[in-house]
Image (tube, helix red, strand yellow):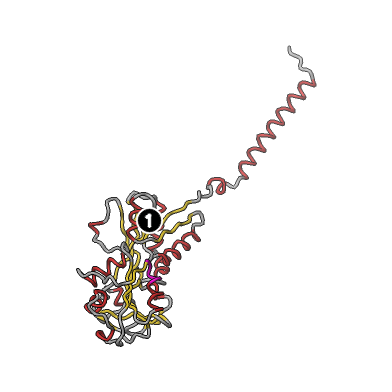
């Protein structure tokens, strides 16, 4: 028979009791953990790059700011250097999304890219508010920019020399203007060339006899819409073209000669986050933001 020492028996019971207390405490601690908070880590910060159209820069600034407010871990870098530049950056992997107003057919979209329309824009033909001309035909605009009409008097204005303002090579706005207005004619070499619609607007505002063309977004926030003209108080107004204006039903129904779509392009195999940004732009909140500058598509 084994005769245990009373002291050893006491120590053995004490160890068992402590072990049970420790196990119970661990179980209680595990049950008390906030399982939901522990299971969902904070999203990793992400920066997406959007490059392209200078005309789309104002709406993209508001659109990306709104998206980041809803998704604080997502930030954006915007490069505005023209539609073609944006498409090149996208193709080379330097951008996640390209913003483009280029109006080439779907068949010419580079392989592997998806092009989604998010809004409609109109290219407005603008003159100084002191110029009495308020309406022009495509033929008259072609004659003015081609250099065959040199005096405003020939198109219903005052007897003053015409000053031409155009956009730089590579601008999708210029491409569309040359395609739909100039046809096969060239813009006169006497035209002042500007890099943005904002620069064109400023030049026309400062020169009474100037005529230029800009995206309507640069007028829509400040202009007073009349029946056949948009006046940007106090120096610039947009004239009607073939009796149509670059806003409202004329634009939405493509009855305005210089209407065009605004696109976002992205890789077909792009990240789900990129698709989520596109969906936001075409959703209710995104379309409301686009409506501040352009005609929404939904």
User: Viewed as shown, does residue 8 lie left or right of 274?
Assistant: right
Q: Nearer the viewer, residue 95 or 62?
A: 95
Q: Which residues are magenta?
A: 195-199
Most frequent secondary structure within the magenta stretch: helix
Q: Is residue 212 above or below residue 172?
A: below
Q: Nearer the viewer, residue 98 or 143?
A: 143
Residue 122 visible to an observer of this rendering:
no
Q: Nearer the viewer, residue 30 or 217?
A: 217
**Within 10 Å of the Cα at label 1, are there few (<14), some (14-19), or many (20+) other Cα atoms?**
many
Instruction: Estimate the x, y position of residue 222 in percent, counting from the top left.
Output: 43, 78
As helix, strand or loop, the secondary structure at mark 1 comes to: strand
Instruction: Estimate the x, y position of residue 12 in percent, counting from the top left.
Output: 73, 24
User: Viewed as shown, does residue 275 lie left or right of 13?
Assistant: left
Label tally: 1
Residue that extends furthest to the top in the rendered view of this protein = 1
Q: Is residue 196 magenta?
A: yes
Q: Which residue is mark 1?
A: 97
Residue 29, quarter of picture = top right
If the image is split into quadrants, where does the C terminus sit?
A: bottom left
Residue 276, quarter of picture = bottom left
Instruction: Estimate the x, y position of residue 166 in percent, counting from the top left.
Output: 32, 71
Residue at image x 28%, y 84%?
Answer: 152
Instruction: Estimate the x, y position of residue 224 in percent, counting from the top left.
Output: 40, 82
If the image is split into quadrants, where does the N terminus sit?
A: top right
Residue 194, quarter of picture = bottom left
Residue 142 visible to an observer of this rendering:
yes
Q: Is residue 164 above or below residue 83?
A: below
Q: Is residue 278 magenta?
A: no
């Amino acid at each position: 028979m084994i005769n245990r020492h009373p002291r050893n028996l006491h120590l053995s019971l004490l160890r068992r009791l402590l072990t049970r207390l420790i196990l119970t405490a661990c179980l209680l601690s595990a049950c008390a953990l906030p399982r939901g908070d522990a299971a969902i880590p904070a999203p990793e910060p992400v920066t997406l790059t959007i490059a392209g159209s200078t005309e789309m820069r104002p709406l993209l600034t508001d659109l990306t700011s709104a998206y980041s407010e809803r998704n604080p871990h997502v930030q954006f870098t915007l490069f505005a250097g023209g539609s073609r530049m944006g498409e090149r950056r996208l193709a080379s992997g330097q951008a996640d999304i390209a913003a483009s107003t280029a109006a080439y057919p779907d068949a010419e979209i580079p392989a592997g890219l998806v092009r989604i329309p998010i809004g409609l824009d109109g290219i407005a033909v603008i003159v100084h508010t002191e110029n009495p001309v308020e309406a022009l035909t495509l033929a008259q605009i072609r004659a003015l920019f081609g250099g065959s009409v040199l005096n405003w008097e020939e198109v219903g204005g005052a007897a003053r020399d015409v000053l031409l303002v155009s956009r730089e090579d590579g601008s999708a706005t210029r491409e569309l203007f040359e395609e739909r207005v100039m046809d096969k004619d060239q813009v006169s070499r006497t035209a002042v060339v500007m890099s943005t619609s904002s620069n064109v607007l400023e030049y026309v505002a400062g020169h009474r006899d100037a005529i230029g063309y800009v995206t309507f977004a640069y007028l829509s926030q400040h202009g007073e819409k009349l029946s056949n003209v948009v006046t940007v108080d106090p120096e610039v107004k947009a004239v009607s073209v073939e009796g149509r204006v670059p806003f409202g039903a004329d634009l939405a129904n493509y009855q305005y000669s210089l209407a065009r779509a605004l696109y976002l392009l992205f890789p077909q195999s792009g990240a789900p986050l990129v698709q989520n940004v596109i969906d936001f732009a075409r959703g209710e909140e995104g379309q409301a933001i686009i409506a501040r500058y352009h005609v929404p598509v939904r």
